[in-house]
Every structure is written in structure tokens, then in C-alpha cells.
Image (cartoon, rainbow, N blue to C red):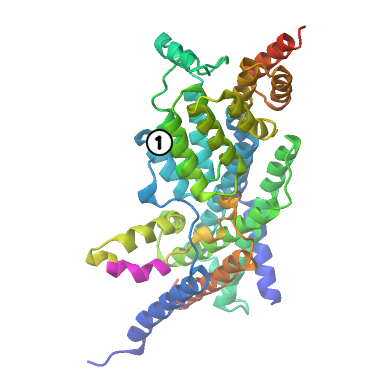
Amino acid sequence: MTALATLSLHVFREQLRSRTYLLVLLFGGAMVYASILVGVLAVDDELRVLLDLGLGLIELTVLAAVVYGAATSILQEMESKTIYLILTRPLAKWQYLLGRFLGLCLSAAFAAGAMGAVHLLLLAVKGWWDWAYPVWLLYTVLKVFLAASLATLFALVSTSVVSAVVMTGFLWLLGHFLPEVTFLVRHGTSFASTLLKPTLYLIPNLQLFNLRDRISVPQASTAWVFLAPVGYLTVYAAVVLAMAVWLFDRKEF
Amino acid sequence: MALRPQRILGPAVLAGGAAALAAAGFLFARGFALPYPAPSEMKVRADDAVEDVALMSLGMRRAAADMAFVRLLQYYGTPEGEPAAQQMAESVGLAQEHHMHEGGVYPEFYPRAREIVDLDPYFEHAVLFAVGSLAFNQNRADEAIDLLNRARARDPQKWRYDALLAAIGYKNAGDPQRVADALMPVALDPDSPALVKQVTAFLLKRIGRRTEAVRVYRLLYDTTKDEGYRENALRNVAELSGH
């Protein structure tokens, strides 16, 4: 447990020292601030635009930082053989991967929290406040956690950073388009549609986490709306990471 | 040739993992439906299709609706200046007095508004703005009713939609007093669009209900950031108050 915590903190610190991570964060913060300009164009609807664009930009920025971090660090450590320094210690391979994943989650939460604070401050200055904001942000971060688990797996499957990032990005897009893809597959009459139906459940359902996109939808705020994404993330990430561990066990450096 | 355990284990792990992922999807996402129109029900303008799809695939559907709304405001704020259309609007009796939308025909207004409603039918401010403009500024009641019905189908609890629908009905029946009565609660809501307040205040002024007109103009002045509306409201308050 201590080893896991130590490794997670090490990854978190490593991310904080990473120029890419900091640059992406800085860029994200600047973009959130710049969304004021678009908000002004909406005249009396400025707050809504500022809220939507800000939350969306925070999500994309954190995603970029975390997926890049997940894809690069493992591959680089394997390439430079520095991974031996870690694995020669009394640390199981599953602990190494889980520690890396948790460290990335920590850095995602930190980045979202920092940018969310700036965003909320901007909104508060404009006269907006809602206690639900941290909840929307939390589910945004949970969505990024799921992407981080996928990026960890793809970093082991692929041989380059680009392909790992592209594969994660592809699933990210597909995960948001899942309701539309499901609609198209269910209404398709071809043999391919029939074949595709079972695979729909394999695609990560990211819309489950997208509470910020359903802010004004009058729906019952049942516990299931909040619990289902957490349960889904737990199982989905656990399975993806288990597969990553299985692959990692068989990997020759 | 005997199969080695490693050869069996790989596909077995993959199949097991896939089954576990599918089970997670089935267990936690079963019955989950996005409360938005299906792709087959949507009518997106070709010019905006790429942007809309890109934002939707990034999970930013509300932001896509916001961008479409900003584009609609810019489109409506660009003068089209056709004297014939201006005369037509005046003959209808509800020609507006604002710096925006004077005279133009704005053939793209409905498709643009429809795109917003398809992207986010819960975007009440945009729906009220578009319906108010179509029904009372552009004399396109059928399109206004169509938009209202699309929004009401998803969000039937919104009383402002019912009020606007009633106002359009009274307008078609040629009863300006009742149009004003129906619009008043919407106009007196600080959160309703400036355009609805403007239309209501102007109508009240025209039918001689000056005190109510002043009240709405004052609220319009206090609640909008649009300088055009504010200047107009100030001028009318001064005029109606006899200053």
C-alpha cells in the first residue's frame, strides 16, 4: 500500500515537473479566460456560454495532459530502460501500473481543480454561482480517469505515443457519440449492424458522465444518475487495467 | 498439434475482458438515453454541420447550441435592409423599432433557430428569442409555432412557452389587447430575452397602455446589456412619461 502511494505521488510530482503538462494547463487556463470574448458575443446569454465553454475546455485540457502523460511515461521508461530501476525494487508489476494510473488521476484532479477554481472565479465575478458546479467538474474528472485507464492500456499495446494517443482519442469521440452510434446500429438492417450490436457495450459510455451537458434538462436527480457513472468507471477501469497488467506481465523490455 | 496454454490464454483473457466490459455497460448504462433528439430528427445546416458534429463528439452539445445561438444573433444583427419587407412588417402592425432586424427578410432565421432547438431543446432563452422574433417581428407565425412545439415536446413544463403560444394565437386572431396580456408575464420575468420585452413594450405603447409599457421598458433597461435596447428603452420611458 505504501509502495502504491509512493509511486502515485512520484507520478504526480513527475507530471507537475513536466513542461508539457504545465504548458497544456497554462494554455487551458488562458483559453478558459479567453472564453469571456465569446461570452460577450452572446450578449444577455453570456453566463451560459462562459459556463459551457469553460467546462468543455477544462475537460479537453485535462484530457490532453493526462492522456499524453499516460502514453509517454510508460513507453519512455521502457525505451530508456529506467523501468528496471523501479521494477527491481519489491514492487509487483500490477502495483507499478496501478500506481501510475492513480498518479495520473491525481494530476487530472489537480489540473481540473486549478482550472475550475479560475473558471468559477470568473463566473462569480460575473454574478453566477451554483453549488452544483463542483459536481459537474467531478464527473468531468471521472470521465478523464476512464480515458487515463484506456491510455495506459494502449501505451502497452502500441509501440508509439502517437498511436496510443490516437486510439484513446478515437474511443473518446466514439464514447460521446455512443447514443448516436447505437441509434444508427439499431436502425440498420444490414448484417453488419447485427454484428455490431454486441460491440456497442464495449465502447466506453462517456455520456453517462456528461452531467454538465444536461444541466438544463429537467430530469429526476435520482441517486442512480450519480452512482451509475461511479460504478461504471470502477468496473470499466478495473477491467481495462487488469488487461493492461496481463499484457505488461508478458512484455519483454 | 497440441495447443500451448499461452495460445489459449490470450484470446481467453481478451474474451473475458470484453465480456466484463460489456457486462459493465449493460449493468450501469442500461436504460440510459440521451434526452436529446435522435440524429434522424435533427436538421443541421450544411455550413455548421462540421462544427456541430465536432462539438457533439467531444461531449459539448450545449456549447454547440451556444455557438449556433451566437451565429443567429450575428445573422439577425446584420441589416438586410429591404424596404418592401419593412413595409410588409409595418402593415402587419408589429413592426419593430429596434436597431436590429429592421427591414430584412432573414430567410435563414428559421433553419438557424431550428438547429439550436435540435441541438439543445432545453435552451429556453434561445427558443423564446427565436419564437418572439419569428412571430412578432417577422410575421412568420407558422415557423414560430413549429419551434415552440419542438421545444415543448422535450420540455413541457415551461410556462413561458404556453404564454407565447397563446400570444401568437391572439395575434393571428387580430386581438392586440390579449396579445399584450399573454406576453406580459413573460416580459416581466427578468430572465426572459430582451427581444420579448421589447416587443411587449412596443405593443403596449401602441395600444395605449402607457403605464405598463413604461414598466416593461424600465425592466428592459435594467436587465439587458444590449446598448441598442437600452437606448431605445430610455428614449421610450422619457417619451411615455412626458419628459
- Asked whether, in this view, residue A33 is left or right of residue A185, the answer is right
Q: Residue at x 64, y 65 (%)?
A: A222
| Vertical arrangement, residue B37 with respect to residue B148, above or below | below
Residue farthest toward the top in the current orientation of the protein: B243
Q: Residue at x 38, y 50 (%)?
A: B39
* Viewer-nearest residue: B145 or B232: B145
Residue B206 showing in the rendered view? yes
Relative image position of residue A253 (x, y in whole percent): 45, 71
On the rendered image, what quadrant is the N terminus of chain B found in? bottom left
Image quadrant in which you'd find residue A48: top right
| Vertical arrangement, residue A246 with respect to residue A27, above or below | below
Q: Mark 1 = which residue?
A: B48
Is B232 within the magenta?
A: no
Q: Residue at x 74, y 41 (%)?
A: A121
- Asked whether, in this view, residue A252 is left or right of residue A106, the answer is left
Image quadrant in which you'd find residue A37: top right
On the rendered image, what quadrant is the C terminus of chain B found in? top right
- Asked whether, in this view, residue A114 is left or right of residue A66, the answer is right
Question: Which amino acid lies under the numbered mark 1 shown in the image of this protein?
Answer: Asp
| Vertical arrangement, residue A136 with respect to residue B29, above or below | above
Is A199 within the magenta?
A: yes
Q: Which residues are magenta?
A: A194-201
Relative image position of residue A184 (x, y in whole percent): 33, 58
Relative image position of residue B139 (x, y in whole percent): 46, 24
Residue A62 showing in the rendered view? no
Q: Secondary structure at mark 1?
A: helix
* Viewer-nearest residue: B180 or B5: B180
| Vertical arrangement, residue B144 with respect to residue A108, above or below | above
